[in-house]
Amino acid sequence: MPRLVGPGAGLLVAGLAPALTAVRLSLHVLGASVWVGGQITMVGLLPAARRAGPDAPRSLGRAFSRLQWPAYILLVGTGVWNVTATAGNQAAAWNVVLGVKIAVVAAAGLGAWLHGRARSKAGLAVWGAVAAAASIAALVLGVLLAG
């Protein structure tokens, strides 16, 4: 097993950098696929779920929630990792976009959380729309940041 001390340690760590970058970005994309793609899929399945019975949409939502929240946590964690790995000599505009993205990610999480607790059709619609719109906005801002 290689030791991470001595004159060759820097070379070993530098050699791992591309692999760590691939892992970091792959995990972030995986989280976004579940979080954003799952919301879009749920919207597409909603009419069929309603036809299946009055409890089907809520049951489907609970099942998705078991995937959704771990994906959100993965996104936030890998997002922090992305920032620490790429921050430094970024332009002021990049930092502004990052600040907006952080706010939008928080809005997406809050919207999804409130959607899960809503009991009225209006509440479900409003908070679901907030979560979806903010999630898509966060996705676009992430692409801008990756540049």
Image (cartoon, rainbow, N blue to C red):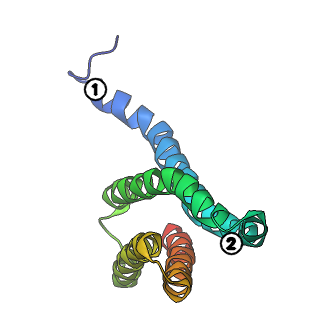
Quarter of the C terminus within the rendering: bottom right
State the CA–CA distance, disc 1 to disc 2: 50 Å
Q: Position of residue 133 (x, y in %)?
A: 55, 82
Residue at the left extreme? 6
Q: Which numbered dot is residue 9?
A: 1
Mark 1 or 2: the one toward you:
2
Mark 1 or mark 2, earlier in chain: 1
Label 1 crowding class (10 Å Cα cut-off): few <14, some 14-19, many 20+? few
- Which residue does the image show at 27% across and 16% down from the upper left? 3
- Which residue does the image show at 29% across and 32% down from the upper left? 10
Asked where in the image residue 4 lies, by quadrant, the reply is top left
- SS assignment at label 1: helix
- Which residue does the image show at 57% across and 76% down from the upper left? 136
Label 2 crowding class (10 Å Cα cut-off): few <14, some 14-19, many 20+? few
In the depicted structure, whether residue 3 falls above or below residue 118: above
Q: Which numbered dot is residue 43?
A: 2
Q: Position of residue 94 (x, y in %)?
A: 40, 78
Residue at the top extreme? 1
Residue at the front extreme? 54
- Which residue does the image show at 29% across and 65% down from the upper left? 88
